[in-house]
Amino acid sequence: MKRLAILSAGLVLWGCGHSPPTRFYTLDAVPPSGAASAGPRTPVQLAAVHLPPALDRPQIVTQVGPGRLEVSEQDQWGAPLDEMMRRALAQDLLARLPDGAFVPPEAPRPAGAHGLVVDVVQLQATPDRIVMQAHWSLTGGASRDVLMSRTVELSAPAPGKGAGGQADAISRLLGELSDQIAAALSAR
């Protein structure tokens, strides 16, 4: 009996020492659906992507009900989400605008270049759909005056269940956002 109790306790402790593996996800650039836009006359540089504090965390967050979020310890972003969104959006814009019209975020900003700031107001991830509301602004070179701004709401089904589907859907939404930004910049 004593051996059985010791063996049971040992199995319980061994089971507690093993947690499920952590899975890491990233966002990827999405190829444009059409040809590159004509582009703005003045180069544009993506200055920042801002996120709501509830999403600014390493764990993947899913809205599971009204006013209720689920934060996954096993499903995490491979880097800070705002940095990954900035990188994916920059790659998307590079593919959608002609050479010289977009300056990568890390490159030196040319004199007179306009700045682009994206504020993700909402990124609601349910198990089967992602909704993103974002506000973007184009600012003037030295003056930093707002030259143009738009608020957009985009949604996409998550192609698969779980965090991998969410990451794919967010990547596609960033591609759609860059389509809209490139079109607005070209029409300017």
Image (tube, helix red, strand yellow):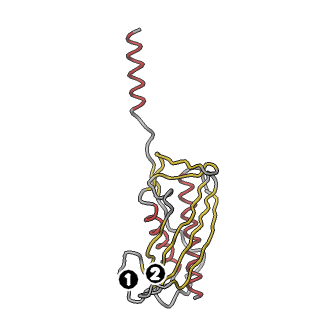
| Disc 1 element | loop
Rendered location of residue 134, percent (x, y)? 57, 69
Above or below for 137 versus 56: below
The residue tagged 1 is 109
Rendered location of residue 125, percent (x, y)? 59, 56
User: Residue at the top extreme?
Assistant: 1
- Nearest to the observer: residue 63 or residue 108: 63
Q: Label 2 sits on what residue type?
A: Gly
| Disc 2 element | strand
At horizontal 41% and vertical 35% (from top left) the residue drawn is: 18
Q: Label 1 sits on what residue type?
A: Arg
- Nearest to the observer: residue 111 or residue 21: 111
Q: Is the residue marked by circle 1 packed among few (<14), some (14-19), or many (20+) residues within 10 Å?
A: some
At horizontal 44% and vertical 46% (from top left) the residue drawn is: 22
Toward which corner of the image does residue 157 lie, by quadrant?
A: bottom right
| Residue 125 showing in the rendered view | yes
Q: Is the residue marked by circle 2 packed among few (<14), some (14-19), or many (20+) residues within 10 Å?
A: many
| Residue 99 showing in the rendered view | no
Toward which corner of the image does residue 12 lie, by quadrant?
A: top left
Confirm or deny contact between disc 1 and disc 2 (CB under 8 A). Answer: yes
- Nearest to the observer: residue 32 or residue 93: 93
